[in-house]
Image: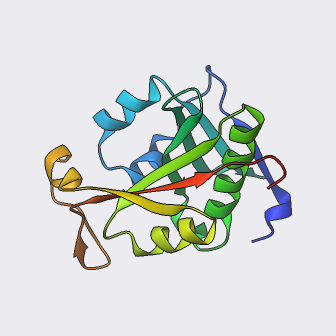
Amino acid sequence: MDIQNLTFRQLRGDEQLPYDLLLLADPSKAIIEAYLATSKVFVAEKDQKVIGAIVLSPLTNIMTEIKNVAVTPELQGQGVGKYLIENAIQFSIQKGYKSICIGTANSSVGQLYLYQKLGFEMNEIKKDFFIDNYPEPIHENGIRAKHMIVLTRLLEEGL
């Protein structure tokens, strides 16, 4: 996919939320709605069609968190997720945040690879997070999602 032809923008308040995408990354609509109340939603568009979404939520006045990042299934693995995260990082730098974090399941092998490749480092494991917070078991890559791995990246202008 030619990333040059993508547009990154914040979703306006009058626009419909891309639940179809958000539910790809988080199977609980209730949990999504809980964090959307304090978050900003950004989308990646190609030819005015939403193909990816990312949700940013402030944790403190110096740290923000990526709560959700999702790409249309047929376009996964083509750089759209990386594009979303890189743009979210730039937005966070512009807003004066000093660090950004993201949590993912122990079973999310591809995501762990991508986040580390983009400069995030593992710094916390929330034991049994997916067992305690989701009523149905979640499986990815033949592995049960049990623990949340939290990765953080320090932000500096010019990166």
- 119 and 139: which is toward the camera: 119
- 79 and 18: which is toward the camera: 79
Q: x, y percentage for residue 146?
A: 21, 62
2 relative to 133 in the view: left or right: right
Q: x, y percentage for residue 148?
A: 31, 57
How are the colours assigned in the image? Answer: rainbow
109 relative to 70 in the view: left or right: left
Residue 89 visible in this rendered orientation of the protein: yes
- 97 and 24: which is toward the camera: 97
- Residue at (65% x, 44% y) in the render: 43
- Residue at (62% x, 51% y) in the render: 154
- Residue at (65% x, 32% y) in the render: 11
Quarter placement of the C terminus: bottom right
Q: x, y percentage for residue 45?
A: 72, 49
Residue 49 visible in this rendered orientation of the protein: no
Quarter placement of the N terminus: bottom right
The residue at the far top in this view is: 14
